[in-house]
Image (tube, rainbow, N blue to C red):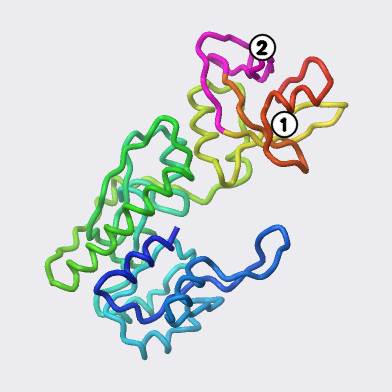
Amino acid sequence: MARPALETLISSQHEVLAVITQPPARAGRGREVQPSLVHALAEKYGIKVLCPDSIREIDAVLRELQPDAIPVVAYGQLIPGTMLDIPAHGWINLHFSLLPQWRGAAPVQHCIWHGDTITGATTFRIDQGMDSGPILGHVTELVDPKDTSGALLTRLADTGSHLLRQTLDAVEAGMITPIAQHHDQATYAPKLQKSDSQIDWQLPAIEIDRRIRAMTPKPGAWTTMALSEHEISLSIGPVSPNRDIQLDPGVVLMMDKRVFVGSATYALELDHVKPPGKKFMLATDWIRGLRVDGVKFV
């Protein structure tokens, strides 16, 4: 999600001295070593790329570059306190929430999971706490009832990139006053675990819908079903609540070429599912291929 921000800064009046990104990693079906999208974009424009395993490795390099500010977007490493004084105007982070709400690694997923209707992006100066530094700017974004975390994050990455540019413009012009966060109002969005994305069909439909959308596309919502005396995991795509159909929790029903599953309140219609070792497919194709009766999620 850092690429839109880099594209915006490259097209601005600000000089990009270097780009810091994660080292190339294996990706794709062939598991070939590939640079990050940010890495590739920087090389396209002839910008110096730094890929340290640890940010501490480039302390001396950054001090030699003498940057006025270091923007940070979804970098994934904590900045040591000993390096915070390197840029004259600090390390300026673009965070995808309205701080102090949802500090941490997964703000967009937690926003949808908990049913927020408004979110946004915030720029702030990094300090030694977790997303606790003084706020420089923010922009709001409505959360659509059908938003997945992927769709919402894409929008926030775009609007946030313009916020980051405006923040740097204001910093350069000396027209910005950092505002301390209200730490007593903070909520937290820790990194998601596999158990967080497991669907509990005993919950109300609205909670299941939120959880599935929050986990789409990553880490991916999943459930299990008892089949041939074994429990089989099944990935679940976004669903559509249907208040007209009542089923017991976990009970699956195919009706009129549509697949429904029960919850604690009303049914949810399955659109696409991903069986083990296969790609996502229509739920109707999946259930026809089972050739068994009485499927139930557990």
Q: Which residue is mark 2?
A: 255
Q: Which of the 4 image quadrants contains residue 248?
A: top right
Horizontal and vertical percent position of residue 16 = 34, 77
Tell me the element at label 1: strand
Q: Which residue is mark 1?
A: 224
Q: Which of the 4 image quadrants contains residue 61?
A: bottom left
Horizontal and vertical percent position of residue 272 = 63, 31
Q: Which of the 4 image quadrants contains residue 161?
A: bottom left
Q: Is residue 164 magenta?
A: no
In this view of the protein, which residue sits in the foreground, 268 or 284? 284
Identity, as a three-letter code, of the amino acid under mark 1: Thr
Residue positioned 12% across, 67% down in the render: 175
Horizontal and vertical percent position of residue 192 = 55, 47
Tell me: 195 left or right of 290.
left
User: Quadrant location of the N terminus?
Assistant: bottom left
- Cα separation, mark 1 vs mark 2, equals 21 Å
Tell me: 5 left or right of 54.
left
Residue positioned 44% across, 36% down in the render: 147
Horizontal and vertical percent position of residue 197 = 59, 39
- Which of pointers 1 and 2 indicates the residue nearer the eye? 2
Identity, as a three-letter code, of the amino acid under mark 2: Met
Q: Is residue 249 magenta?
A: yes
Badge number at residue 285: none
Residue at the limit of the structure toward the right, as seen here: 228
Q: Which residues are magenta?
A: 238-267
Characterize the local packing of mark 1: few (<14), some (14-19) or many (20 or more) Cα atoms within 10 angstroms.
some
In this view of the protein, which residue sits in the foreground, 11 or 165? 11
Nearer-N-terminus badge (1/2): 1
Vertical position of residue 45 compared to residue 271: above or below? below
